[in-house]
Image: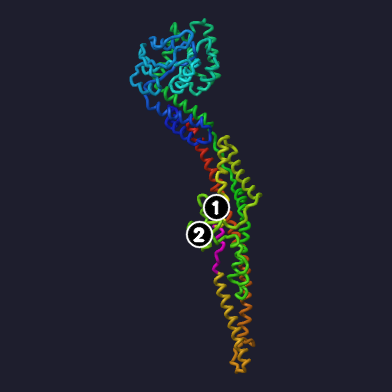
């Protein structure tokens, strides 16, 4: 025969730790009252756990005229509390102790200076019974004292009388609010000696109905008479069982944790993040002038190719035209030694840049000359950021949804400088010269030298003929003299090489523009991820951890 083991829930320590974690994560997201309340509960629980757990603090609480003090005296076996007829006589809580050795620090924490040993039997060893002021007293200080101790004691014994057991002040202010504490609560209908037996049964049934409506189903309800002693034995036996278990203090703390966690909210599954990076990246690319930069990369590549590989006779004309990339101040900014593409902590707001050289692996400073984003482009960026926040916050509770939306906008002011910087650093690679340009340039100058040699040779021949000097033997290629071959062939070869180089540069410019476009989209996407999506993910992760901690605390 298999024995079934009862699955134990999280320990009190783990629930307290989870409550504190949830409170810390909820800081600034949820109302301060709920957050500070959770911290107060955790602090109170931490103190109570260090005090005597061999003593159970039970409090008799009730309204004026309910007979709390009479019941207190009857349980203690002596007249410890003054009993009034009309006016409330209990102005400060006092304690009756059954074997109170070691309870001093606990009573000091509760701030109960009046302490008396009980004169009744010792079957309640470990009980500390408090007689509280009336919760409906005309004295504000009395009500505040009740409210304070109701939050601290281990066991609550609510004393009601046949006339006021349905009082809304009791049910609305205390019983309904303490529904999670039904495991540490008793309700005593006192003064039943004033009623016939049939009326007592009706009162008990009606009181049971009211308690069930308050969420206190299962809370023991006893009918007693402090004057005649009816029902006192049952009440004493029930108190003895609770005291003997030595669990009321932990049950109370567990209920406090549950209530504090409930005030922080109901744990809900964190929503799955929705991919909004494409729309955001597209808007940022357009606002940063990426299409303009990509076009300038293609044109700049062709421009520099003509300067580097064009026919030496005419290439200087190309130098008179501005470099498209230099016009955008890309590839001309001053390096500061950081890796290319690495973003600064807060972006750069500089408006000028040094003209020193830039080596590979250097981070640039300053701003490009890419035209500022138009109002339409800025609106698209703002819309994309708002869409990211709205999509991420769609399934979140109100305060957390607002925090996610705020996180999406939290670093939006840094986007302009960060995107401009990443455009400059990423596009800087577009100014690198392909190796074949150098080879073609050497070839062009060799061809130009051959053309120049042919021109000088022919010039020398014309000079000798003009001076009527004898002509030296002239080598030929077929019927064409070598000087003519060098001159005409060099010119034609130089032009042909320049044309072929221009075609290669056009194709290379397109390839480089495509690569730059991909690199820019990736780099701008990283900026959007770092400054917009990362804060949103962090907030969602915070909510997920809050939900997990809240679930552990409520377990």
Which disc, if any, is residue 512? none
**Colour convention of the picture:** rainbow
Q: Quadrant of residue 498?
A: bottom right
Distance between mark 2 and mark 1 Cα atoms: 16 Å
299 up-or-down from 218: above or below: below
Q: Is residue 427 magenta?
A: yes
| 514 inside magenta stretch | no
555 relative position to 455: left or right: left
Disc 1 is placed on an element classified as loop
**How many residues crowd mark 1 within 10 Å: few (<14), some (14–19), many (20+)?**
some
Q: Secondary structure at mark 2?
A: loop
Please say if 226 is above or below 107.
above
**Residue 537 position in % (x across, y down):** 54, 43
- At x 54% / y 14%, what residue is drawn? 166
| Residue contact at pointers 2 and 1, CB within 8 angstroms | no
Q: Depth check: 485 or 28 in front?
A: 28
Residue 190 rendering spot, x and y as whole percentages? 48, 10
Residue range (magenta): 425-435
Circle on res. 335: 2
In terms of image quadrants, where is residue 84?
top left
Camera-nearest label, 2 or 1: 1
Q: What number is the disc on residue 349?
A: 1
Location of residue 547 in the rendering, given as x and y in whole percent from the top left corner:
51, 35
């Amino acid at each position: 025969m298999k024995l079934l083991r009862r699955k134990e829930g999280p320990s009190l320590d783990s629930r307290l730790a989870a409550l504190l974690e949830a409170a810390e994560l909820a800081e600034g997201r949820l109302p301060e009252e709920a957050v500070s309340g959770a911290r107060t509960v955790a602090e109170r629980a931490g103190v109570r756990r260090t005090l005597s757990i061999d003593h159970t603090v039970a409090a008799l609480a009730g309204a004026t005229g309910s007979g709390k003090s009479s019941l207190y005296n009857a349980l203690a076996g002596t007249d410890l509390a003054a009993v009034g007829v009309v006016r409330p006589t209990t102005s400060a809580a006092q304690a009756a102790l059954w074997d109170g050795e070691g309870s001093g620090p606990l009573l000091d924490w509760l701030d109960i200076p009046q302490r008396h040993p009980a004169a009744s039997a010792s079957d309640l060893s470990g009980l500390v019974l408090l007689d509280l002021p009336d919760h409906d007293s005309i004295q504000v200080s009395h009500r505040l004292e009740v409210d304070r101790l109701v939050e601290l004691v281990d066991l609550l014994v609510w004393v009601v009388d046949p006339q006021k057991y349905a009082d809304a002040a009791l049910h609305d202010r205390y019983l309904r609010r303490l529904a999670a504490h039904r495991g540490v609560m008793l309700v005593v209908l006192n003064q039943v000696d004033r009623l016939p037996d049939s009326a007592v049964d009706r009162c008990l049934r009606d009181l049971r109905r009211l308690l069930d409506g308050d969420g206190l189903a299962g809370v023991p309800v006893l009918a007693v008479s402090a004057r005649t002693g009816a029902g006192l034995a049952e009440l004493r036996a029930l108190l003895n069982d609770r005291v003997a278990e030595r669990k009321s203090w932990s049950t109370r703390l567990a209920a406090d944790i549950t209530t504090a966690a409930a005030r922080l909210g109901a744990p809900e599954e964190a929503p799955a993040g929705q991919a909004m990076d494409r729309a955001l990246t597209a808007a940022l690319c357009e606002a940063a002038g990426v299409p303009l930069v990509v076009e300038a990369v293609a044109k700049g590549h062709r421009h520099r190719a003509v300067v580097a590989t064009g026919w030496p006779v005419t290439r200087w004309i190309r130098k008179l035209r501005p470099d498209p990339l230099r016009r955008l101040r890309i590839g001309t900014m001053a390096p500061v030694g950081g890796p290319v593409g690495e973003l600064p902590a807060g972006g750069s707001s500089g408006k000028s840049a040094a003209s020193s050289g830039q080596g590979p692996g250097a981070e640039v400073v300053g701003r490009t000359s890419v035209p500022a984003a138009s109002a339409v482009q800025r609106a698209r960026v703002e819309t994309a950021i708002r869409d990211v926040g709205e999509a991420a916050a769609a399934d979140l509770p109100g305060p957390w949804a607002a925090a996610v939306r705020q996180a999406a906008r939290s670093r939006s002011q840094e986007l302009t400088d960060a995107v401009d910087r990443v455009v400059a650093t990423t596009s800087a690679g577009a100014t690198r010269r392909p190796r074949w340009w150098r080879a073609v340039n050497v070839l062009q100058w060799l061809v130009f030298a051959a053309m120049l040699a042919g021109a000088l040779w022919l010039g020398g021949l014309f000079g000798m003929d003009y001076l009527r000097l004898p002509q030296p033997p002239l080598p030929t290629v077929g019927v064409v003299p070598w000087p003519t071959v060098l001159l005409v062939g060099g010119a034609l070869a130089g032009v042909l090489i320049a044309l072929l180089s221009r075609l290669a540069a056009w194709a290379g410019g397109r390839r480089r523009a495509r690569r730059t476009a991909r690199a820019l989209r990736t780099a701008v996407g990283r900026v959007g991820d770092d400054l917009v999506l990362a804060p949103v993910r962090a907030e969602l992760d915070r909510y997920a951890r809050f939900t997990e901690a809240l679930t552990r605390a409520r377990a």
